[in-house]
Image (tube, rainbow, N blue to C red):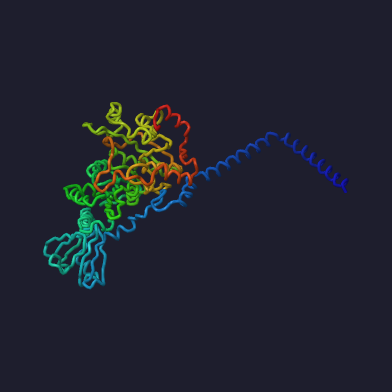
Amino acid sequence: MQSMDRLRYRRFLISFRRNLRLIRGSFRRHARRNLLVLLIGFLFSLWISSRIGQYYNSAQVRWLKLQSFVQPGILGGAPEFAAKESRLAKINVKLCSADGKLCSYWGPHQIWDAKDLNRDESWLVPGRIEVPIGVKAVLQMKNGGQLVLPFGQHTCSSQRLDCQNISTMLVEESILSAVDAIEEACAADDWTTRPEIVHTIGPKKHAKERDVTMVAQFSISRLDRFEKAILAWSGPVAAVIYLPDHKDAVALKKYFSTAGKANIYASVTLTLIKPNYSRGAHTRYPINQLRNVGIVTAETDYIFVMDADFVPTTKLHAFAHSAIIPLLEKATYPTAYIVPCVAIKEDYKGRYPDTIKELQPLMKSGVAHITDPRAGHGPTSTRLFMNPPLFGSSPAFEVCFESQWEPYYIVHRDKYHPFYDERFKNQGGDKQSHALLMNAIGFKFLVLRDHFIYHMDHPKLLWTGEGLDQAQQKDFTLFENFTPELEKIFGKAYRWPRGCSNPFVHSSRCDIQGIGTM
C-alpha cells in the first residue's frame, strides 16, 4: 500500500517537473510578450488598488460617515431653523368674514383691487384684516384717502377702518413692521417671558440660484459698519441681526426710521432675532447658530460667510460670479476659495484700498497687516497673495490646512459643505471648528490673489450690549470637546491636510517663512 502511494507521488512529481520545463521553455521563447503581459497586469492591479483606496478615502465616503453622527446644528448638521418653506406663509395678509368662519390670504407685491376682494366669499361681510409681522397693508380708499395698516389685527367695524370703502390693497414686506412687532414685545410688562421672534424679510429683487450670497451676522452695534459691506458687494446679501437685550429694539427702530437706512437693506435678505429673555441662554452670543440662519435664508447656491466688521473689494462679487462659480462647478473635489483678510490701523485717515496695487504700499508701511498673522490667518500665506505669480495668471494658489486656522471662503453650500457647529458661543473656536471639519472631509483650499476683505484694526474685539455675558465660562471648547469627536469619526489623522496636493512642500515653506506657527 505504501509502495503504491510512493509510486503515485513519483509520477506526480515527474509530471509536475515536465510541465514546469514546458512553461519555462514557452516563457523563454516569448519572453518579451510575457514580460509585457506581466507588466500590464501589475499596473492594472495597482490601478485597481488605488481606485479602491481613493473610494474608501474619498470626501464622499467621509461625508456619508459624518452623516451618521450629525444632529441638528451639531457636527455640521443642518439647523432646525427653516425659513424658505415657511416664509411665504408668514407674509400673507389674512381677510376674514364677520363671523370668522371664512378667511382668505392675500400675497405681497401685488395690488388687489375691489373686484378681487369682492369675488372672495369671506369678503362679502368683512370682519377683520390680520397683518402678519414684517408686512404692511396699504389701503387706497374710495374717497381718495390712504390708510396703512401695520402688523396686528384690525377690525372692520372700527371708526378708523371702513372695509366697505376700500378701493385697492397693496401688501408689502416692511422692515419697520417687523421692528415694531419686536419693540412691542420688548416693551410689554411681561417682556421677560415673551416667546422668541425670528422673522426674515426678503429682498425686493430676488437673486438667481447661480450667484454668490455674502452672509453675515451681528448685533445692533455693527449696523452702521455693515453698510459699507452692503454697498461694496454688488450681489445678494443675507444678514442676521441678533438682539441680546430687550432695549436693543428701541435702537433698532431708531436706526431703520432714519431716512435712507431701510433702503440700504432693501436688497438684503434680513433676519431679525429676538430671543426668549427668560431662558438666560441669550447672554451668550450664538454666533454659529446665526451664521447657519444666514446660510439657510440665502437664495443662492454659493455663499461667502464673513464677519460684519469686514468690507470686501468692490469687484469681488463680480469676480466670484464670473470666475469662481465656473471653477467650483468644474471641480471634481470639494473646494473652498479663500478671501484674504487684512486689518488697517484705526488712526489711518487716507483712502481705503480696493485693489492689490492700493493695498501694497499700506502693507509695506505697516498701516495694513494680515489679521492675526500667526495661527488665525497666517496659513493663508499673505506674502504669496501680495505678489504676482511667476508663471501664468492663476487667480488663486493652493495652501494646506493648519490647526487653529479660521479663513473666510466662497463655497458651494450643498457640495459636502457642513453647517457651523452651533454649540460654539461667543468667541473662540467658532470658525476654527468649521475649517477643521472641512479639512477632515477633504476640502482643497485655494487663496485668491487679486481680492481681499479689510477691517479697521482693534486691540480686542468685545461683543457689545448689556445682554451679553463677556466673562461666562465656556462649556464647549475646540480642543477639549470638538476635536475628540472628530477623531472618533475620522481617526487620528483628521488634522492631516487631506485635500492638499503637496502637504510636505507646503509645511517646509511655512517653516521657512515663519507663518502659520503657534
Asked if 192 appears above or below 347 in the picture, the reply is below
Image coordinates of residue 60 in percent, x first then y, are: 48, 47
Image coordinates of residue 52 in percent, x first then y, are: 56, 44
Residue drawn where x is 34% and y is 58% of the image: 85
Q: Is residue 216 visible?
A: yes
Left-right relation of 33 to 142: right
> In which quadrant is the C terminus drawn?
top left
Q: Work out whether residue 219 or residue 88 is closer to the camera in this orientation and state it.
A: 219
The quarter holding residue 178 reads bottom left
Residue drawn where x is 28% and y is 52% of the image: 273
Asked if 349 appears above or below 440 in the picture, the reply is above
| Total numbered badges shown on the rendered structure | 0
The quarter holding residue 338 reads top left
The quarter holding residue 453 reads top left
Q: Is residue 202 visible?
A: no
Left-right relation of 501 to 240: right
Asked if 260 appears above or below 29 in the picture, the reply is below
Image coordinates of residue 210 in percent, x first then y, are: 35, 48
Residue drawn where x is 79% and y is 39% of the image: 17
Left-right relation of 228 to 302: left
Q: Work out whether residue 474 or residue 457 is closer to the camera in this orientation and state it.
A: 474
Left-right relation of 345 to 490: left
Q: Work out whether residue 12 or residue 426 is closer to the camera in this orientation and state it.
A: 426
Image coordinates of residue 141 in percent, x first then y, are: 14, 64
